[in-house]
Image (cartoon, helix red, strand yellow):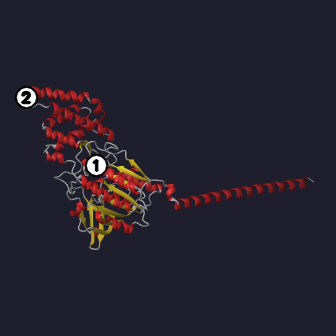
């Protein structure tokens, strides 16, 4: 009897366990089916209704052009912008320079982190090839202004750009790499790498010495032909739109210094960048205001008769008292190496100012003071130095075409941009970036506010669901450089 009872109890326990296992299995199967069903449904919605996922078109306004890279790559990671996108580049310049190869650079790979992206931000005209090397851009359409015709052999040009690497130097330490570019069209192929020599940056090379890793399509089209051409390619193409405000004209920010023969420009700058090291745009603004006020004080109190020793001594003491009274403005922005000898550096700068006449001092006030490049730029290769805000080019040393515009032409070109953007009204771009190009001294400063107003107006009128974001690196913030 005991054996019989034990056998029956065992059978019941076995049945209960079996039922429990079956229930768990069914529960897991239902949960798995539910999760798979929800994932499929989510993917269907995202593919069928992208407008609900991205409810507005972001427009990011930046100061220097390479500052668009973090925004482009971030939105590609988020899925707003597909990789292998077409870039519509409306600009006074092609911006197709190549970065320098550095150890640790994301070598034809997608950047893994902010450090990789920062290394890609070496120069304000190398951001397109950097993005293409990473696999982000498959085709570039450069819309160029008619005033740049001297640099073009035809109103329309199409070809292929191949990006690769080459060996530029052999040494006992091994081979030194650099990036290279080959441009191919119906006339043949031309390969080059970029040197640090600004007067001759493009160095031609043998075609077979550039080991190609990426290829992209390239078209450059004159502004008056852009609407017709873009109408022929815009259907079923994912695009991002990029506009540089120097498309409206290119005037040297340093021109007032040369017009009024201001001497020792580089000397004055060398003392300024030894003395001041602002770490952000608000600090730049504080120092710009302080130095322009200091110059104004000198202009108002300068001696009429330079040989009057007593007057000069009194003026010197007044000036020193002026900047000492304002120390609460500038002291926190001194370079670490200048803390001990700031008085000496100040004295040298004041001496340089006192050698100038009122017209020359006014020219410096017009140009203003700022960092040479954003802190977002890769500092190990292109450090930010504080000095006169004269930009990257001067009338005597430049390969950039100058075009002095006027208010009527600015508004005419604004209407043209509006028409170009109208091509994509039914199929808006995935993303828009606008570059001011004030710090680097390209965009005409006196028309800056008109230009930006017209650009943003054209974007908003063609793409109603738009939000404009102003980058925290803008020179003097949203309102722009105060000398504009």
The quadrant of the picture occupied by the N terminus is: bottom right
Q: Nearer the viewer, residue 312 or 300?
A: 300
The single residue placed furthest to the right in the displayed view is 1
Residue 323 drawn at (x, y percent): 23, 30
Tell me if residue 99 can be seen: no
Which quadrant of the figure has residue 41?
bottom right
Distance between mark 1 and mark 2 Cα atoms: 44 Å
In x, y percent, where is residue 398? 20, 55
Question: Residue tagged by mark 1?
Answer: 448
Mark 2 crowdedness (10 Å alpha carbons): few <14, some 14-19, many ≥20: few
Closer to the eye: label 1 or 2: 1
Tell me the element at label 1. helix
Q: SS class of the residue under badge 2?
A: loop
Residue at 14 percent across and 47 percent down: it is 259
The label on residue 198 is: none
Q: Is 70 on the left or on the right of 413, as rendered?
A: right
Left or right of residue 4: residue 225: left
Residue beneath label 2, please?
308
Q: Residue at x 37, y 69 (%)?
A: 232
Report the residue that reaches farthest toward the left: 307
Residue 33 falls left or right of residue 199: right
Q: Does label 1 or label 2 sit earlier along the sequence?
A: 2
Kindly indicate the quadrant of the structure image that contains residue 126: bottom left
Residue under the image location 62 percent in, 60 percent down? 37
């Amino acid at each position: 009897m005991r054996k019989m009872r034990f056998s029956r109890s065992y059978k019941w326990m076995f049945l209960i366990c079996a039922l429990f296992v079956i229930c768990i299995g069914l529960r897991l199967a239902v949960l798995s089916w539910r999760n798979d069903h929800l994932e499929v449904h989510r993917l269907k919605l995202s593919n069928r209704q992208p407008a609900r996922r991205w409810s507005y078109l972001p427009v990011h306004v930046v100061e220097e052009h390479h500052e668009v890279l973090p925004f482009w790559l971030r939105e590609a990671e988020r899925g707003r912008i597909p990789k292998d996108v077409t870039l519509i580049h409306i600009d006074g310049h092609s911006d197709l320079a190549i970065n320098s190869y550095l150890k640790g650079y994301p070598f034809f790979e997608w950047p893994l982190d902010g450090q990789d992206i920062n290394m890609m931000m070496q120069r304000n005209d190398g951001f397109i090839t950097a993005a293409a090397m990473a696999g982000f851009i498959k085709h570039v359409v450069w819309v160029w202004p008619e005033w740049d015709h001297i640099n073009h052999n035809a109103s329309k040009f199409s070809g292929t750009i191949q990006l690769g690497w080459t060996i530029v130097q052999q040494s006992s330490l091994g081979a030194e790499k650099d990036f290279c570019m080959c441009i191919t069209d119906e006339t043949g192929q031309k390969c080059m790498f970029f040197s640090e020599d600004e007067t001759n940056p493009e160095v031609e090379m043998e075609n077979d010495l550039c080991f190609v890793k990426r290829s992209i399509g390239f078209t450059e089209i004159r502004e008056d032909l852009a609407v017709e051409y873009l109408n022929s390619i815009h259907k079923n193409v994912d695009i991002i739109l990029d506009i540089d405000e120097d498309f409206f004209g290119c005037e040297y920010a340093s021109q007032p210094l040369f017009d009024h023969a201001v001497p020792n420009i580089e000397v004055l700058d060398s003392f300024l960048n030894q003395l001041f090291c602002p770490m952000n745009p608000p600090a730049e603004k504080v120092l710009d205001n302080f130095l322009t006020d200091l110059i104004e004080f000198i202009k108002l109190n300068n001696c009429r008769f330079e040989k009057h020793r007593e007057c000069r001594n009194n003026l010197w003491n007044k000036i020193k008292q002026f900047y000492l009274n304002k120390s609460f403005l500038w002291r926190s922005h001194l370079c670490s190496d200048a803390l001990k000898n700031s008085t000496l550096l100040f004295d040298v700068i004041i001496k340089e100012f006192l050698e100038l006449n009122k017209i020359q001092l006014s020219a410096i006030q017009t140009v203003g003071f700022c960092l040479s490049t954003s802190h977002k730029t890769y500092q190990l290769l292109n450090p930010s130095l504080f000095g006169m805000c004269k930009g990257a080019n001067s009338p005597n040393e430049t390969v950039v075409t100058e075009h002095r515009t006027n208010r009527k032409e600015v508004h005419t070109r604004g209407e043209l941009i509006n028409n170009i953007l109208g091509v994509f009204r039914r199929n808006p771009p995935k993303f828009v970036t606008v570059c001011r190009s004030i710090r680097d001294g390209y965009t005409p400063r006196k028309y800056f506010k008109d230009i930006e107003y017209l650009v943003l107006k054209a974007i908003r009128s063609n793409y109603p669901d738009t939000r404009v974001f102003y980058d925290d690196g803008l020179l003097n913030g949203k309102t722009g450089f105060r000398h504009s």
